[in-house]
Image (spheres, rainbow, N blue to C red):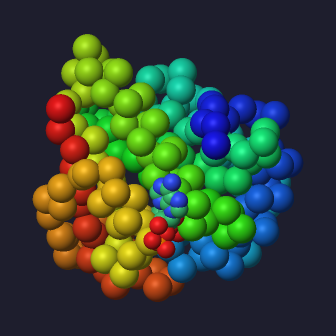
Amino acid sequence: MKLRKVSDADASELLQVVTESLEHLKPWMSWATNDYDAATAAGFLANSAKGWADGRLFNHAITVDGAIVGVAGADRAGDVVEIGYWLHPAHTGRGLATAAAAELVEFAFALALDGVRRVQIWHDEANIASGGVPRRLGFSEIDRRTPPREPAFGNEAGVDVVWELKR
Ligand SMILES: CC(C)(COP(=O)(O)OP(=O)(O)OC[C@H]1O[C@@H](n2cnc3c(N)ncnc32)[C@H](O)[C@@H]1OP(=O)(O)O)[C@@H](O)C(=O)NCCC(=O)NCCS
């Protein structure tokens, strides 16, 4: 598994991976809908380029043998970096999301000189697979929030579980 910065050149491959993953993503990712198309992928990549340029949002492609199998991002707000991730369903169960998140933890704390002190992962209470990632990486559960940050949809229970790692 390798993580790399996403780029505009990823548009068609990203569209294909998301399209193949749609039924697996729909229960948990609000952007994963039947409307997802080339313009959605291009918009995500344009927003990612802006995020990197602003030093605020760092979206990475999760790759295996050079092929995109998911995305992992680090989103900075003040002294906190929040990590998010998704995988193509053919690539779950192998520790790839955990490895990607572990790399992004180091990436986030490398911004420490810039004031980053805490890394968080948020997921819906019903999303057990997502919660496995921070658990394996030694994060502590610090909160359960109702109502959730965004309205619940899909398989969500409507309770946000918040995990945190401090250094
Ligand atoms: C969330 C998501 C990325 C988690 O995927 P995952 O495959 O469970 O996570 P990992 O890639 O870290 O793999 C962990 C699994 O691989 C196993 N594994 C195998 N080798 C491993 C290794 N070297 N290291 C860690 N885990 C390993 C683990 O035991 C675990 O399997 P288990 O849950 O059956 O115990 C995936 O379920 C997904 O894409 N969901 C839809 C999108 C989503 O919900 N994103 C998060 C929103 S908050």
Is residue 76 visible to us here?
A: yes
Residue depicted at 85% across the width and 48% down the height = 12
Residue positioned most to the top: 113
Residue depicted at 76% across the width and 34% down the height = 8
Residue 82 in the image, given as x and y percentages of width and height: 35, 45
Give the side of residue 52 with respect to residue 134, left or right. Answer: right
Residue depicted at 31% across the width and 77% down the height = 125
Position above or below: 153 against 42? below
Residue positioned most to the front: 94
Q: Nearer the viewer, residue 3 or 125?
A: 3
Q: Nearer the viewer, residue 122 or 48?
A: 122
Q: Nearer the viewer, residue 61 or 77?
A: 61
Residue 144 in the image, given as x and y percentages of width and height: 18, 70
Residue depicted at 35% across the width and 66% down the height = 131
Count the labels in the image. 0
User: In the picture, which quadrant includes the N terminus?
Assistant: top right
Position above or below: 87 against 145? above
Give the side of residue 155 with respect to residue 82, left or right. Answer: right
Position above or below: 72 against 160? above
Residue 76, image quadrant: top left
Residue 63 in the image, given as x and y percentages of width and height: 69, 44
Is residue 31 visible to us here?
A: no
Residue 23 in the image, given as x and y percentages of width and height: 68, 79
User: In the picture, which quadrant includes the C terminus?
Assistant: top left
Give the side of residue 143 with respect to residue 13, left or right. Answer: left
Give the side of residue 52 with respect to residue 16, left or right. Answer: left
